[in-house]
Image (cartoon, grey):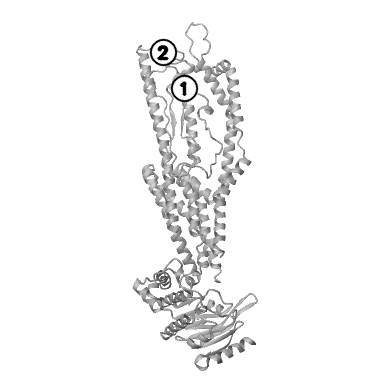
Amino acid sequence: MLQALNLSKAYGNQVALDSLNLSIAAGEIFCLLGANGAGKTTTINLFLNFTAPTSGQALVDGLDVIQHPLESKRRLAYIPETVMLYRNLSGLENLDYFASLGTQQKYTRSQLETFLQRAGLAPDAATKRIGAYSKGMRQKVGIAIAIAKQAKVLLLDEPTSGLDPAASNEFSELLTQLSREGVAVLMATHDLFRAKECGTRVGIMKRGRLVQTMATSEIGHTELEGIYLEHMRN
Amino acid sequence: MALACLGLFLALLLYALASGTFQQQRQQQTLAATAQEETERLAKLKAQLLRIESGKASAAGFLDPRSGTAIGNTSGVRYITMPPAPLGTLSVGLGDLHPYFYKLSLRSKSFTLNNEELENPLNLLSGPFDLAFGIVILFPLFLIALNYNLLSAEREQGTLALILSQPISLKALVTGKVLVRGGALVVAAVAVTLAGGLLFGAGAAVFPRLLAWTAIILLYGLFWMGLCVWVNAWGRSSATNAIALSAFWLGFCLIIPSALNIAASALYPIPSRVEMIQSLRTAGKEAQEQGSRLLSRYLEDHPEFAPAPAPGAPPAPAPDFGSITYAVQMEVDKRTEPVLARFEQAIAQQQAFVDRLRYLSPAVLAQGALNEFSGTGLARYRGFQLQAERFHRTWQQYFFPKIFQKAKLTSGEIDTLPRFRYQEESLEAVVARSAPLLAVLTLLSLLAGGLSLASLRKFKRSL
C-alpha cells in the first residue's frame, strides 16, 4: 500500500533521507523510530508530497505521489504531532469541512457524529469549539477525518507525544482497530513502548538511513530498547 | 469578521451612491431653476416690448429695452447648459471642477466662459465621496482586508498541513478562497452600481455604460485579488502580507496619482492666474482708452455694420456707448487670445503627460475609465466648453450688427433668439477613448492573476 523506492531527499549538502526502501502492506502498522533529524518527518512529508524527493519514488497504493498528487491524497490521511484545526469552529464543523475537502462529498450530521464517535470523541464534545479541546481530543478529530475519508493509508507524525498514558493507549487501540480494517499505517514516534505494543513492524532510522527493520512479534520491550540504544550510541 | 467587512463595504457604497445622487439632484435642480428663470425673464421682456410697440409704455431711459445691448447682455440672455452626465450619480468625476452651465453675455469669452477653478485640472483621485471613489479606493482596501492572510493564516494556525493532505491542489484551494471572499465584495459593488445606474441613470441609454462599469469592477477586483494571492505565495507572515499589501494600495491609489499630479505641474507649470487676470485687465484698459478709435477701425473693416446715414443728413453722430463697448470687447478677446492659449496649452500638456503615465497605476486607469463611462471625464467637459465657445460667438454675431446699426429688436424676435443645443458625445467616442484604458487594465489583471498562479507553484510547502 505504501512504498518507498530508493527515496532520497537532500537539502543542499545535507542529506535528510538516503535511499529509503520500504514497503508497508494493508493492515500493517509500521513504526519509524529514531532521533530528531533522523529523517522520519522527511519520509512522511515525501509521501504527502509536501516536499519533492531528490531522487527515488514514493508510491501510495501504487501511485507515484508526484505524478498523481490528488489521487494519492484521496487514499491517505495525515495526523501531525498536533492536529491543528479551526479554533472557532466545533469539532463537528471541522470534521465537516475537512471531510468534504477530502471526499468531495457532503456527509449528514448523523454520519459525522458517527465518525466522531468511532474515533472515540465524547458526544457532548462534538459541538464544542476546538479552542476548548485537549490534544487527545484533537487527535480523535484527526482520526475521524481519516475514517470519513475511508483512507487506506494513515501517516502519523509523533501523534502520541504529549498525550497522557491513558489517552495514548486509547489512541493506539484506535490505530489497531483501523489496521484490522485494512488500513496501512506509517507512524513516526519516539515512544518505543507504544511502537512495540501496537506496531507490527518497527524501523530504526539514523542520519537519513533506515538501519534496521524488525517485526514486533519477534522481540521484547527491553530487547527493542537495547537495539535502539545500540544504534544511537554508534 | 468577513461578514462585518462585507456589511461595512456595502454600507459605504450605499452612502457613496446616496452622496452621488444628491450631487446629481442638486445639479438637476440648478438646471431646472436656470431654465425657469430664462423662460420667465424672456416672457417678461416680450410683454414689455409688446407694450412699447403698442405705445402703452415708453422706451425712454438710460438704455432702450429694445436695443441689442440691453437684450443681448442682460434681459434676453440665454443659458448654455449641459444635461447631467448619463451616470453622473455614480461618479462625480470632474463634475465638481468643470462648470455645466454658463450665463451668456456679449462680453469677452474670458469673461463670459470663465472657469473659476483651475488649480487642479487633473483631479485624478481626490474629490467627492461617490461610488467611483468607493470602487477605486475602498474596494481594494476591503479586498486586502479579507484576503491578506489567505494562506498565511492557515499556516500560522497550522491548518494548512491538514488541508494540503487532502486531495485538493494549492491552486484550487487559494482560487476558491479568494474567489469566495473577493467575489462577495465584487457582487456587492456590481449590485450597488447596477441599482444606482438603473434607478437614477438616464434610462436605457445607460445599459452599455453599466456593462462597462461592471467589466471595470471585475477587472480591477481581479487585479487586487491576484496581488493578494501573489503576496501570500511569498510564504511570509500575515503581518508582513498586510504591510506589503497596504504598501501596494498606498502606492497605486495615493502615491502614484499624487506623484503624477506633482510631476505634471512641475514639468508643465500652469501660468500664474494672477498674471492672466492682470493681462486681461491691461488689455481691457488699453482697449477702453482707444475705444472710439477701435470702433471706427472696426467699422472700416465691416462697413456693412455702419449705421446708415440718412441721405443729406449731417455727418454721423459720435459713436454710442454700446458700440464702443463691444468693439472694445472684441479687441480684448483678440489681445488675450495668446494668454489664454498659453494657459490651455499648459493644461493640455499636463493632461497629455498624465495620459501617458496613468498606465502606471490600475487605480488611475480604473478611475479614468469609470469617469469616461459615467460621462464625467475631462473630454466631455472639454467638448461642452468648445460648444459653449462656439455658441458664445454665435450670440455675439447675432447681436453685434444690431448694436452697431442701432437696430431695435421686436417682440417677435424674442422667440427666435439663438438657442443652445448641447450635442451629447456618442458612445462610440467614449468607447474609443476608453479602449486603451480597458486594454491595459485587462492586461494588468491578467498579469496579476497569472503571476499569482505561477508563484503558487513555488510556494514553499515545507510546513
Q: Identity of the amino acid at label 1?
A: Asn
Label number found at residue B25: none
The reply, left or right, for residue B204 in relation to residue A71 is left
State the residue at coordinates (60%, 43%): B262
The percent coordinates of residue A100 (x first, y second) are 40, 71
The percent coordinates of residue B306 (x first, y second) are 50, 15
Pick out the residue farthest to the bottom. Answer: A218
Q: Identity of the amino acid at label 2?
A: Ala
Q: Nearer the viewer, residue A129 or B233?
A: A129
Q: Using the image, name the chain to which the residue with label 1 belongs.
A: B
Instruction: Find the distance from the CA under tag 2 to the CA under tag 1.
Output: 17 Å
What secondary structure is marked by label 2?
loop
Residue for badge 2: B59
The reply, left or right, for residue B256 in relation to residue B170 is right
Quadrant into which the N terminus of chain B falls: bottom left
Q: Using the image, name the chain to which the residue with label 2 belongs.
A: B
Marks 2,1: beta carbons within 8 A = no
What secondary structure is marked by label 1?
helix
Question: In the figure, B79 relative to B224: above or below?
Answer: above
The percent coordinates of residue A70 (x first, y second) are 46, 73
Q: Nearer the viewer, residue B310 or A10?
A: A10
Quadrant into which the C terminus of chain B falls: bottom right
Residue for badge 1: B73
Q: Reading the chain from its start, which is encountered first: label 2 or label 1?
A: 2
**Quadrant in the picture for residue B412:** top left
**Quadrant in the picture for residue A145:** bottom left
**Quadrant in the picture for residue A106:** bottom left
